[in-house]
Image (spheres, rainbow, N blue to C red):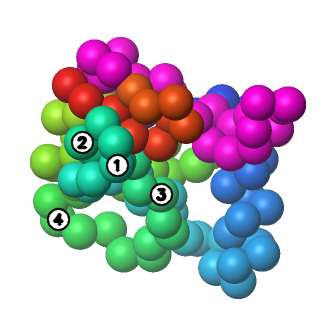
Amino acid sequence: MITVTEKAKDQVGVLRQEEGHAEAANLRVSVKGGGCSGLMYDLSFDEEIKSSDEVFEDQGLKILVDKKSMLYLLGTTLDFSDGLNGKGFQFINPNASRTCGCGESFAV
């Protein structure tokens, strides 16, 4: 399961509206190769739920994760920070053995 903080949920709503997505657009969370630690997080909006997707709901937000990414994301919390150290989404991932300084890539 992936959980979402209230700050992250609010920011997803802002971005959904700014990018012109329908209210029904779901949040897709995935993992791709790349970044300084080897794996990168990817967030996007998707209105289609594929048969191979794991579907979670938290804070009234539907989250889609493909099965391969789920291996890396199980137990992750999505947060949003707008503090002095930077603005953006943060992944609190118990599966990551290390993360890069910017927090956008990780290794297991």
- Of marks 3 and 1, which one's residue comes earlier in the chain? 1
Q: Nearer the viewer, mark 4 or mark 3?
A: 3
- Residue visible at 49% across and 24% down? 92
- Of marks 4 and 3, which one's residue comes earlier in the chain? 3
Mark 2 lies on residue: 38
- Of marks 2 and 4, which one's residue comes earlier in the chain? 2
Q: Which residues are the magenta region? A: 75-98
Write down the quadrant of residue 37 in the picture: top left
Write down the quadrant of residue 74 in the picture: top left
Q: Can residue 64 be seen in this snapshot? A: yes
Residue 43's label in the rendered image is: 3
Mark 4 lies on residue: 51
The residue nearer to you, when weighing 45 against 50, is: 45
Query: Does the residue at mark 2 contact the one at mark 1 (Cβ under 8 Å)?
Result: yes
Q: Nearer the viewer, mark 3 or mark 1?
A: 1
- Disc 2 residue type (three-letter): Gly
- The Cα atoms of the two marked residues, 2 and 1, are separated by 5 Å
At label 3, counting other C-alpha atoms closer than 10 Å, the crowd grade (few under 14, some 14-19, many 20 or more) is few
Mark 1 lies on residue: 35
